[in-house]
Amino acid sequence: MKKDLMQYKGYSCRPEYSVDDHIFFGKILGIRDVVYFQSDSAKDIEREFHEAVDDYLEFCTEVGKEPQKEYSGLFNVRIPPELHKKISVLAQAEGVTLNKAVEQAIRALVQS
Protein backbone atom coordinates (compact mmCIF):
# COMPACT_ATOMS: atom_id res chain seq x y z
CA MET A 1 0.00 0.00 0.00
CA LYS A 2 2.68 2.53 0.94
CA LYS A 3 5.01 1.67 -1.95
CA ASP A 4 3.52 4.50 -4.04
CA LEU A 5 4.24 7.10 -1.36
CA MET A 6 7.12 9.55 -1.52
CA GLN A 7 8.69 10.38 1.85
CA TYR A 8 10.62 13.48 2.88
CA LYS A 9 11.36 14.86 6.37
CA GLY A 10 8.61 12.71 7.87
CA TYR A 11 5.98 13.85 5.35
CA SER A 12 4.34 11.80 2.62
CA CYS A 13 2.61 12.29 -0.69
CA ARG A 14 1.22 10.14 -3.48
CA PRO A 15 1.91 11.87 -6.81
CA GLU A 16 -0.75 11.70 -9.50
CA TYR A 17 -1.05 12.63 -13.15
CA SER A 18 -3.79 14.78 -14.67
CA VAL A 19 -4.54 13.70 -18.23
CA ASP A 20 -6.64 16.82 -18.80
CA ASP A 21 -3.98 19.26 -17.60
CA HIS A 22 -0.90 17.25 -18.61
CA ILE A 23 0.76 17.77 -15.23
CA PHE A 24 1.96 15.70 -12.33
CA PHE A 25 0.66 16.90 -8.96
CA GLY A 26 0.44 15.95 -5.35
CA LYS A 27 -0.63 17.01 -1.89
CA ILE A 28 1.28 16.72 1.36
CA LEU A 29 -0.55 14.10 3.42
CA GLY A 30 -1.13 14.12 7.19
CA ILE A 31 -1.11 17.86 7.83
CA ARG A 32 -3.84 20.29 8.89
CA ASP A 33 -3.20 22.64 5.99
CA VAL A 34 -3.64 21.90 2.32
CA VAL A 35 -0.37 22.07 0.41
CA TYR A 36 -0.38 21.11 -3.26
CA PHE A 37 2.52 21.01 -5.68
CA GLN A 38 2.87 20.24 -9.37
CA SER A 39 5.33 19.65 -12.16
CA ASP A 40 5.26 19.34 -15.92
CA SER A 41 7.51 16.27 -15.75
CA ALA A 42 7.65 13.08 -13.72
CA LYS A 43 11.38 13.66 -13.38
CA ASP A 44 10.82 16.85 -11.34
CA ILE A 45 7.84 15.88 -9.17
CA GLU A 46 10.00 14.65 -6.28
CA ARG A 47 11.94 17.91 -6.23
CA GLU A 48 8.64 19.84 -6.20
CA PHE A 49 7.43 17.72 -3.28
CA HIS A 50 10.63 18.46 -1.33
CA GLU A 51 10.28 22.18 -2.05
CA ALA A 52 6.64 22.11 -0.94
CA VAL A 53 7.60 20.47 2.37
CA ASP A 54 10.46 22.91 2.93
CA ASP A 55 8.21 25.88 2.11
CA TYR A 56 5.49 24.57 4.40
CA LEU A 57 7.92 24.11 7.31
CA GLU A 58 9.35 27.59 6.73
CA PHE A 59 5.84 29.09 6.64
CA CYS A 60 4.89 27.36 9.90
CA THR A 61 8.03 28.68 11.57
CA GLU A 62 7.30 32.21 10.33
CA VAL A 63 3.76 32.23 11.68
CA GLY A 64 4.60 30.27 14.86
CA LYS A 65 2.42 27.23 14.35
CA GLU A 66 3.00 23.52 14.75
CA PRO A 67 3.39 22.02 11.26
CA GLN A 68 2.68 18.34 11.83
CA LYS A 69 -0.88 17.25 12.44
CA GLU A 70 -1.23 15.70 15.86
CA TYR A 71 -2.94 12.32 16.06
CA SER A 72 -4.62 11.24 19.29
CA GLY A 73 -4.64 7.54 18.45
CA LEU A 74 -8.43 7.48 18.76
CA PHE A 75 -10.82 7.22 15.84
CA ASN A 76 -14.18 5.66 15.05
CA VAL A 77 -14.42 3.08 12.33
CA ARG A 78 -17.65 1.89 10.75
CA ILE A 79 -17.56 -1.63 9.35
CA PRO A 80 -20.22 -4.12 8.32
CA PRO A 81 -21.70 -6.05 11.28
CA GLU A 82 -20.46 -9.38 9.92
CA LEU A 83 -16.87 -8.09 9.76
CA HIS A 84 -17.26 -6.71 13.29
CA LYS A 85 -18.38 -10.16 14.45
CA LYS A 86 -15.46 -11.90 12.71
CA ILE A 87 -12.79 -9.63 14.19
CA SER A 88 -14.41 -9.85 17.63
CA VAL A 89 -14.46 -13.67 17.55
CA LEU A 90 -10.89 -13.75 16.23
CA ALA A 91 -9.74 -11.44 19.02
CA GLN A 92 -11.41 -13.62 21.65
CA ALA A 93 -9.87 -16.77 20.15
CA GLU A 94 -6.43 -15.14 20.22
CA GLY A 95 -6.93 -13.90 23.78
CA VAL A 96 -6.56 -10.22 22.89
CA THR A 97 -8.88 -7.27 23.05
CA LEU A 98 -10.82 -6.12 20.03
CA ASN A 99 -8.72 -2.95 20.06
CA LYS A 100 -5.49 -5.00 19.93
CA ALA A 101 -6.79 -7.16 17.07
CA VAL A 102 -7.70 -4.07 15.04
CA GLU A 103 -4.30 -2.52 15.83
CA GLN A 104 -2.54 -5.69 14.62
CA ALA A 105 -4.59 -5.67 11.39
CA ILE A 106 -3.75 -2.01 10.74
CA ARG A 107 -0.05 -2.63 11.45
CA ALA A 108 -0.04 -5.50 8.95
CA LEU A 109 -1.66 -3.26 6.33
CA VAL A 110 0.67 -0.29 6.74
CA GLN A 111 3.81 -2.43 6.88
CA SER A 112 3.06 -4.21 3.61
Image (cartoon, rainbow, N blue to C red):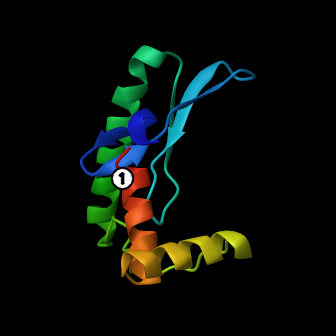
- The location of residue 87, given as percent across then percent down, is 55, 72
Q: Residue at x 33, y 72 (%)?
A: 65
Q: Nearer the viewer, residue 79 or 68?
A: 79
* Quarter of the rendering occupied by the C terminus: top left
Give the vertical position of 43 relative to 6 (above or below). above
Residue indicated by mark 1:
56
Q: Nearer the viewer, residue 108 or 88?
A: 88
Q: Amino acid at mark 1?
A: Tyr
Q: Is residue 102 visible?
A: yes
- The location of residue 106, given as percent across then percent down, is 43, 62
Q: Residue at x 48, y 38 (%)?
A: 14
- The location of residue 54, given as percent across then percent down, is 29, 45
Q: Residue at x 29, y 55 (%)?
A: 57
Q: Is residue 24 left or right of residue 110?
A: right
Residue 97 position by quadrant: bottom left
Residue 81 position by quadrant: bottom right
Helix or strand or loop: what does disc 1 sit on? helix
Outermost residue toward the right? 20
Q: Nearer the viewer, residue 107 or 31?
A: 107
